[in-house]
Image (cartoon, rainbow, N blue to C red):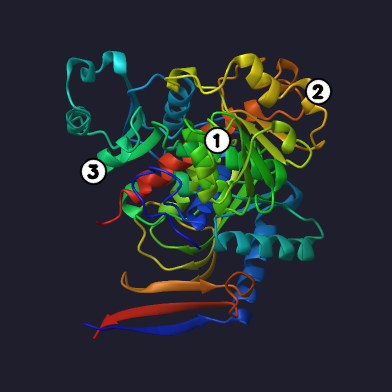
Amino acid sequence: MKDKSKTLLVMDADAIRKAIRRIAHEIVERNTDVSRIVVAGIPTRGVEIARRLVDHIEEIEGVRPDFGVVDVSMHRDDLSTRGRLTAVVPTELPVDLDGRPLVLVDDVLFTGRSCRAALDAVSSFGRPSQIQYAVLVDRGHRQLPIRADYVGKNLPTTRAEKIRVRFENLDHVPDSVSVVKTEEA
Amino acid sequence: MSAWTRKDLLGLEELSAEEIRLILDTTRAFKGVGQRSLKKVPALRGKTLINFFVEPSTRTRTSFELAALRLSADVVNLSVGASSLQKGETLKDTALNLQALQADIIVLRHSSAGASRFLSERLEASIINAGDGAHEHPTQGLLDTFTILEKRGKIEGLKVAIVGDILFSRVARSNIHALIKLGAEVTLVGPTTLVPRVFEKLGVRVAHTLDAVLETADVINLLRIQHERQRKEYFPGLGEYIALFGLTKARAARLKPDCLIMHPGPVNRGVEIDSDVADGARSVILEQVTNGLAVRMAVLYLCAGGAGLPS
């Protein structure tokens, strides 16, 4: 049997930029005091999106929110079924979270398990006043009662498809979101 | 990005430089856990770890135990006094019994080189070598390397002197493998009886006085004289050893100002190192202990994940 995969581009660099900028506007709209919020990305690509969100929010409001990284790998419940492990990125939450709104950022919302792990991870750092969740793509197929507050693009998929997010500064190819369909031929 | 795919950690000799770097990167993340107000993560929840120590050890065992507890694993300690090995059961049978108790991870300290490899080939559980004879003590080698990396920002090109009882030292062997792979220049220092030239085959230099490396070393790692492993006399006496190899105050004054002074413990104050030097500003001996905890968390985490690979 031969693997034949088909890649379909669904967002190009411009579409990604506009989606992230719109989310930044929504975050500003919903949070009256931007200087209080912490925007934290889930590695690897959630961190990049969080970084861009912080830039956009600063452009819009003139105030730069605090930025952070939330590692979820040591809080997941599927360690023994993952097999391949890559290095864990340290959690960096530069400020005391207690009483401040936290915006968690990820690239793709799928089963919701990363988000659950992130909520668990955050709880050992403090008690934010609220936690909001921003994703670039929501592809459906949730396994937990979790939803995103900010969505760049809703993308109906089948479970067999994969969503591939690429950023120029990490992957050395132009920014893109694509659906990869794997068919057995 | 490189990935970890092993269920066991038996030694550093068989690891690639990428695998060692991956453990060190992961260690950095786990060190952060110890600095939180809530020092526990659920990564190994529901896993059982057995500390199986057929040779006495307090600090390594405690470090592994604490590392496992911080990862939410359940831990049982089994030491030789309590073990059936004294009643004549073989190592393999004892280990099979541990596996029958559904241990997921066995941390083994044993006086025979290769004991952990022997078990890893026979058991499905992850085997972590916590010291096997004079062969390897991989987590100690990793924590020493991590400490150097953290303090100096790099390993490549650093001049590291490992001083003392090299012949009987698994700590030295694990350090040598890790440091050479990451590009350090390693010099072994000690009497000819404890540092034979055959070590040069590992890609290290050999010196027979501490004075030869004092002014150039970036790191000095002093090993403990292991009275318990020496079956005959390898040097005339402690006085003579101190005269040639002890890091006295006078010698410490000739070190580079930023030279790191390391010791895997337990320290024989006044033998390998003067008390004042051990407590001085350049000494990172206690940081090694803290880093040991983070290294062991990283190793347990990675091997528990690696065990999930379809074989």
Q: Mark 3 = which residue?
A: B124
- Mark number displayed over residue B250: 2
The residue closer to the viewer here, A11 or A86, is A86
Q: Position of residue B29 (x, y in %)?
A: 56, 44
Q: Are marks 2 and 3 on the same chain?
A: yes
Provide the chain ID for the residue under circle 1.
Answer: B
Label 3: few (<14), some (14–19) or many (≥20) C-alpha neighbours in 10 Å: some
Mark 2 or mark 3: which is in front?
Answer: 2
The amino acid on which the numbered mark 3 sits, given as a three-letter code, is: Glu
The amino acid on which the numbered mark 2 sits, given as a three-letter code, is: Ala
Mark 2: secondary structure: helix
Residue at x-position 42% and y-position 46% = B302
Structural distance between the alpha carbons of marks 3 and 1? 37 Å
Residue at x-position 46% and y-position 56% = A147
Horizontal side of B163 relative to B199 (left or right) equals right
Q: Is residue A58 above or below residue B288?
A: below
Q: Mark 1 = which residue?
A: B195
| Residue B46 sits in quarter | top left
The residue closer to the viewer here, B196 or A41, is B196
Q: Are marks 3 and 1 on the same chain?
A: yes
Q: Is residue B57 visible?
A: no
